[in-house]
Image: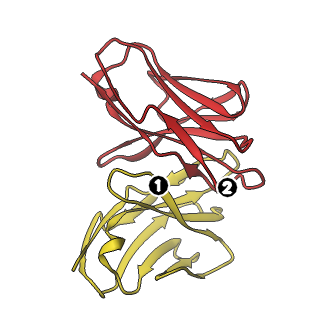
Chain colours: A red, B yellow
Amino acid sequence: DMKVTQMPRYLIKRMGENVLLECGQDMSHETMYWYRQDPGLGLQLIYISYDVDSNSEGDIPKGYRVSRKKREHFSLILDSAKTNQTSVYFCASNPLGDQDTQYFGPGTRLLVL
Amino acid sequence: GEQVEQRPPHLSVREGDSAVITCTYTDPNSYYFFWYKQEPGASLQLLMKVFSSTEINEGQGFTVLLNKKDKRLSLNLTAAHPGDSAAYFCAVRTGNTGKLIFGLGTTLQVQP
């Protein structure tokens, strides 16, 4: 069973605060992704990580950075959060042997006041 | 780059009716196609993965059709029930970056 975890599930922050979103998988998946989902805009890719310390910008990387120091963990960091970063954030990963299919975590709902 | 257009954005049907959601894509080299289902407040659940060589794909209560000539992918729910009420997203895999290009989604409501 493909299991991708995300923490926290809900988060409220004030503008200017730092935000750390965590994603995990215990299946040695290589490629992991961070998306945000907004009404009317669908899913937008923020970053891709192909392996430890091998990260690539997605379509909307501005205002975000990522960290992957262990294969099973992929973090999304917002330094000085902005109100327009209020969104639902999803992490996804590719299972070993299948670089085409993405399995998604449960999501983190972030509200920046 | 690849673009994916999904129609309709909203769809309401009665229980037992069929529901059809369609995506068109632009890159003829696209080779994997996906449908995801997202229930309210939940994550995206993979419904089906389709390879470009397979035109008709049967799932539980639905069929996915791929028309490569017209670059069109469709999800057909044959006899919708209220449990099918959700948002549905198509996605297309193209190139070798690992990226999926998603449609904007269709919100399906099935009335009892």
* Figure quadrant of residue B52: bottom right
Where is residue B9 shown, x and y percent of the image?
29, 63
Chain letter for mark 2, please: A
Which secondary structure lies at badge 2?
A: loop
Q: Disc number at residue B112? A: none
Q: Residue at x 78, y 54 (%)?
A: A97
Residue closer to the observer: B101 or A68: A68
Rendered-image quadrant of the C terminus of chain B: bottom left
Q: Are marks 2 and 1 in contact (CB under 8 Å)?
A: no
Q: Amino acid at mark 2?
A: Asp
Examine the image and state in which quarter residue A108 appears.
top left
User: Residue at (63%, 62%) from the top-left corner?
Assistant: B30
Residue B100 x, y percent position in the rendering: 57, 51
User: Is A97 on the left-hand or right-hand side of B68?
Assistant: right
List the residue tagged with mark 1: B44
Q: Label 2 vs label 1: CA separation?
A: 16 Å
Up the image or down, B34 lies above or below B80; here it is above
Residue at 67% across, 44% down: B97
Figure check: A75 above or below A39: above
Per the image, the residue denoted by label 2 is A100
Q: Mark 1 Cα within 10 Å, few/some/many (few <14, many 20+)? A: many
Judge from the rendering whether residue B8 lies leftward or rightward of residue A106; answer left or right.
left
Left or right, A81 with reference to B36: left
In front: A93, or B91?
Answer: A93
Where is residue B77 drawn, in percent x and y?
Answer: 41, 80
Visible residue check, residue B28: no
Q: Residues within 10 Å of mark 2 (few under 14, many from 20)?
A: many
Q: Is residue B7 visible?
A: yes
Residue at 43% in and 57% down? B103
